[in-house]
Image (tube, rainbow, N blue to C red):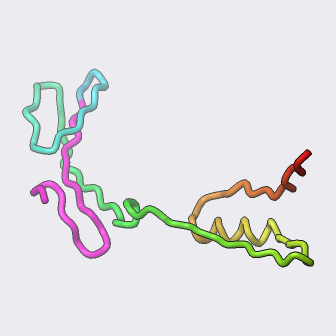
Amino acid sequence: MSLHAYQSGDNFHFAFWLTFSKAGDVRLTRRAPALDRDERAVSMTAVLPLALWATPSLSAQLVVQADAAPTINIEIATAALRSALGIDIDLRVTPAEEPQ
């Protein structure tokens, strides 16, 4: 792993420099930058959770008996997905089109 990035516990640490100029320009470098007269640099470290790189995997199975119709509570299903994924879900249940 780079000297500018390392893992500690459940986080990645990324070291970098932000350089600002009087003209309003900004640039990012991994190593200490060479500065012009009108530039100033700030050493920064970003600490990001390893969970950012984890891809959730969801699967579901719905088994319906021949003599029963499924009942799905959309509000509960949406709340469960929101809780598991941390995002809002637009969940809809629509009947399948009947073959003609």
At x 19%, y 53%, the residue is: 15
Q: Residue furthest left?
A: 34
Residue 35 x %, y %: 10, 31
Residue 61 x %, y %: 67, 72
Q: Is residue 63 left or right of residue 5?
A: right
Q: Where is residue 72, by image quadrant? A: bottom right
Q: Does 12 lie within the magenta span?
A: yes
Q: In this view, does 65 lie to the left or right of 18?
A: right
Residue 75 versus residue 66 in the image, above or below: above
Q: Name the quarter where the C terminus is drawn.
A: top right
76 or 65, nearer to the observer = 65
Residue 6 x %, y %: 18, 63
Q: Where is residue 92, by image quadrant? A: bottom right
Q: Where is residue 70, by image quadrant? A: bottom right
Residue 73 versus residue 99 in the image, above or below: below
Q: Does 43 lie within the magenta span?
A: no
52 or 62, nearer to the observer = 62
Residue 55 x %, y %: 44, 62
Q: Start and end of the magenta stretch?
A: 1-20
At x 65%, y 67%, the residue is: 81
Residue 96 versus residue 41 in the image, above or below: below
